[in-house]
Image (tube, coloured by chain):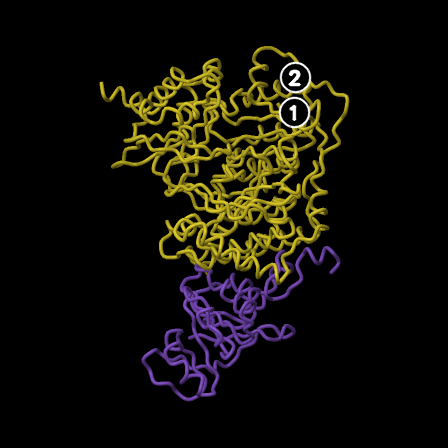
Amino acid sequence: MLNAVVKPVAPNMYRYDEFDAQFVSERVNQFAGQVARRLTGELTEDQFKPLRLMNGLYLQLHAYMLRIAVPYGTLSSKQMRKLAHIARTYDKDFGHFTTRTNLQFNWIKLVDVPQILRELADVEMHCIQTSGNCVRNITADQFAGATDEEIEDPRPLAEIIRQWSSLHPEFTFLARKFKIAVGACEQDRAAMQYHDMAVQVVKNAQGRIGYKVMAGGGMGRTPYIAHVMREFVEREDILAYLEAVLRVYNQDSRRDNIHKQRIKILINTIGPEEMRRRVAREFEELKRMGTLQLPQEELDRITAYFAPPQFETGLPDTIPEAGPDFANWAKTNVHKHRAPGYAIATITLKTPGQVPGDASADQMDVIADLMDQFSVGEVRVTHEQNLVLPHVRKKDLPAIYARLKELDFASPNAGLITDIIACPGLDYCDLANARSIPIAQKIARRFEDLDRQHDIGELKIKISGCINACGHHHAGHIGILGVDKKGVEFYQLQLGGSGAEDASIGEIMGPGFTEREIADAVERVVNVYLKRRQPGERFLDTYRRLGMAPFKDAAYEKEAA
Amino acid sequence: MTKLINFSNKEVGGAYTQDNFAPVADDAALPEGPVLVSLARFQKERETLLERNTPIGVKLQAGENPELLGDDVNRLSLVALEFPKFRDGRAFSWARMLRTRLGFSGEIRAVGDFLYDQVNYQHRVGFNAWEVPDTFTLEMFNRALTEMTNVYQPSTDGKKTIRELRAGG
């Protein structure tokens, strides 16, 4: 149960100054005005729609859904407690962490929205641009600032991009939504190459730090892996470069067919070379004007907010012995940290049987306590719908594990077959053709046995309830797409996708399976891997070596018999 | 009925103004005085129009890049940018381009289907005139421009950004 008193810890993350606070507060008032105009009928639903969407408010199957931005996935304990409070007060006691590292509430009343926004503003949060045809919430590597794999913490850059893109006058009515991710290492934990634009911190041959910019990745009905737009952009030029890409997109994208209006379509129609040429022209002009140059002082000022916490020295640098269950969890859910004696711990919101990404108000409160007690008041949301405690002492891991167990969030399955991404699907979503959540639950139950999960090793299953691919099925080692055939839900399998640094688009296997068959089909596919893998191979590696045929034969085996 | 609001004096705010430009269909005879024609007509009758020595306006559709006007752009007094539907935001980039790359200092007028909530963005990227329905009051116009005090990004309005304000600029 809840701890009586835990002293809140303020983590090192961006904090609003008077300008940010005024900006968000005025934006809340502006949106409150829009809600009022809708309620009186001055705005039609058609006119209100793009306005509410720009503020993260969707009309779902049953109610309004409000999506709250979690910039680059970083939350303080104070913010987590506020989210718990909102879940309790205005929703049905729970919230849902999304693949955009946001949090959404599914049962919100329109009249309550202005008040919710004011409460969020109190803890420096907002819903600005969590939806609509504008630059969306910026996502980042969830291990940013904690992993030794990175060149530097990419979050200061993400914050700079967030500010630049907030109510950008030229880019607020784009042809379609525009998603940006940032990272700073070769390992890609943010599905960067599946984004409209991705910025990776890199070092050039002279050892100078700058940015590699990619664009044109995306999922949906036409999946693409991003193209490199420029291998190295100088630090001070990055906003000018991003503005140049957005400008070409805004000017040249189609506007006549909603399915062909993402930047990926533009780039793959005119070709990456022509895109680079058009962007370069805008970029040179912006550089000449000089108004978007990023001064070093501003970069330093923002970077200072994200200074690493004061790590204790002399801590034991080993993970304690605490029984086989804990050892299993430590094996999958604990990652190497940059500081000796510390670790990064992943809390998977994927206990088999649970709705992926959901957390109750009580669970959020306890996680806030864990953040304060064990991780300098900080947590990260991942695009795989998990949470991460970024800075924990190794010696505290057993205590953290014990508390997570009470919460039912202690599944030792990070990156394993039951750590499934699933969109809300037909249970909530207006666009869905099929349910996703029950399929995720069914498969997770099927593979619940821990020895078996650990034997299978890294295997990413991603499930979408429609072609829009919010569940990232194209990027799943095993992707599942729900389709509707004459009122019956069918599930198509895709194999060989990856959202990591070795990004690839999954290949469609063939006709779909019924809800009853799908878990069996997945199991038969997994069995082919277990039978034919070579030492050290992940499912993805074996698939890439063998190709579709043996997996396909096995999956349809029952039908063929 | 529509009215024309212009914004040329920051102290005064928006003001109603007389629309002196006669919109002329592509197949209609040119009347005396200032005219507003399509890009197609301007390109076809460029010399006739420029020789008249009366102010010329060209109305661009959302898909028409102002660069299509070539060097003639600065012989125009008015460029009207059409919003075919409020979701189509291309004209935000066209206005920006007119003001910066093309150095156009005449009137940029928003016409078509746009919302109250877009007026401030339009103003920021370089629009200085708005063709609005009768129900759109000056009070609404001025409110639209003042709902958000500060901005994060530089644009053609030259407004100081939050970053500059932070630096004490």
Question: Height in image: A313 above or below A95?
Answer: above
Q: Residue at 61% x, 19% y: name it.
A: A401
Q: Say what amino acid the circle numbered 2 marks.
A: Ile
Question: Height in image: A379 above or below A553?
Answer: below
Few, some or many residues within 10 Å of mark 1 (<14, 14–19, 20+): many
Few, some or many residues within 10 Å of mark 2 (<14, 14–19, 20+): some
Q: Colour of chain A?
A: yellow
Return the x and y of residue A211 as percentages of the image width and height: 60, 45
Q: CA distance from mark 2 to mark 1?
A: 9 Å
Local secondary structure at mark 2? loop
Q: Residue at 72% x, 46% y: name it.
A: A300
Chain under numbered label 1: A
The quadrant of the rendering that contains the C terminus of chain A is top left
Q: Say what amino acid the circle numbered 1 marks.
A: Ala
Q: Residue furthest front?
A: A205
> Of marks 2 and 1, which one's residue comes earlier in the chain?
2
Return the x and y of residue A312 as percentages of the image width and height: 76, 26
Return the x and y of residue B95 as percentages of the image width and height: 51, 67
Q: Quadrant of residue A530?
A: top left
Q: Which residue is mark 1?
A: A343
Local secondary structure at mark 1? strand
Q: Residue furthest top?
A: A323
Using residue A441 as the reference point, say whether residue A29 is left or right of it. Answer: right
Mark sitting on residue A319: 2
> Does the CB distance between marks 2 and 1 fall below 8 Å?
yes
Q: Residue furthest left?
A: A561
Q: Which chain is purple?
A: B
Return the x and y of residue A113 as percentages of the image width and height: 54, 47
Chain under numbered label 2: A
Please indicate, yes or no, whether residue A14 appears anywhere in the rendered image: yes
